[in-house]
Image (tube, grey):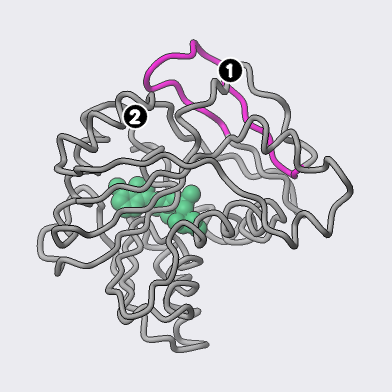
Amino acid sequence: MTTDYDPIAEQYQRSKQQPWRIHIEAYSLMELIGDPTELSVIDMACGEGFYSRMLKQKGAAKVTGIDLSAEMVNLARQQETENNLGIEYIQGDARDSAGLNPCDLVVAAYLLNYARDREELQAMCTGIARCLKPGGRFVTINSSPLLNFATAPSYRKYDFETQVTGIWEEGAPITWIFYLEDGPLLIENYYLSAHTHEQEFRSAGFRRVNWHVPRLSPTGLAEYEDGFWSRFMEQPPVALIECIR
Ligand SMILES: C[S@@+](CC[C@H](N)C(=O)[O-])C[C@H]1O[C@@H](n2cnc3c(N)ncnc32)[C@H](O)[C@@H]1O
């Protein structure tokens, strides 16, 4: 795994305030998750806890956030100190979920797109399936495995862009450039096809897999001029997946 979030933790946190993140990403993910009331939840690759907090505030009984990056976990814990919601944050690896209590729901925003090959994806899917109760759900949003990023349009009007420099093939790096007030933030993740994802979900023990396109919030629609979101919605760079164990 080459992407280290420690040096970019604070910048990444600010990128979560971009309008598309709120009106499309968070809206779509939370709509797909539905009502988390009384559920035990693991937010895998929780980062600074953006979705951990949302899930707890929406009524989840127990939320545990897990992330590889010590700095991301620090930012999450700082916010827990400022406003205690009762969320536990652990520095850990999604590929090694031994010791975690099985839960009802695992959420992972932008984890699977860090798998550079089938083996890494398999390790993540197996780790996630292992910490779910039978019948439990896994809900995730990632760089879309359904989009050819080599021929994707510019998303500059939404304050980010994506770039592919090499050959478009399994494992190809995708660079996301977020335009923040103090300059661009570059993040690299990787393409693996929808077919590879399907196979690895099944081999990890998921029996149902549903793919979902992102949705635009009614507020996002109302607050921007007609057609503003069309390019994003017609060629969405993110995709949501729901798997049942
Ligand atoms: C793009 S950030 C997303 C953070 C958070 N889910 C959000 O949406 O704000 C990706 C996160 O995945 C974490 N990560 C990458 N590989 C991981 C792994 N194998 N296990 C746990 N976390 C991982 C990184 O440290 C980083 O915080």
Q: CA distance from mark 1 to mark 2?
A: 17 Å
Read off the residue under disc 1. Answer: 150
Residue 116 got which mark?
2
Query: For the residue carrying disc 2, how many other residues have a C-alpha within 10 Å: few (<14), some (14-19), or many (20+)?
Result: some
Q: Which residue corresponds to the image point at 58% horizontal and 17% vertical from the top-left?
A: 150
Image check: 76 left or right of 201?
A: right
Residue 80 got which mark?
none
Disc 2 marks which amino acid? Arg
Q: Residue furthest right?
A: 225
**In terms of sequence position, does the residue under pointer 1 or pointer 2 come before the other?**
2
Q: Which residue corresponds to the image point at 59% horizontal and 59% vertical from the top-left?
A: 27
Is 106 colored magenta in this rendering? no
Q: Quadrant of residue 38?
A: bottom left
Q: Residue furthest top?
A: 167
Q: Position of residue 97 (x, y in %)?
A: 17, 57
- The residue carrying mark 2 has its beta carbon less than 8 Å from ligand 1: no
Q: Quadrant of residue 218?
A: bottom right
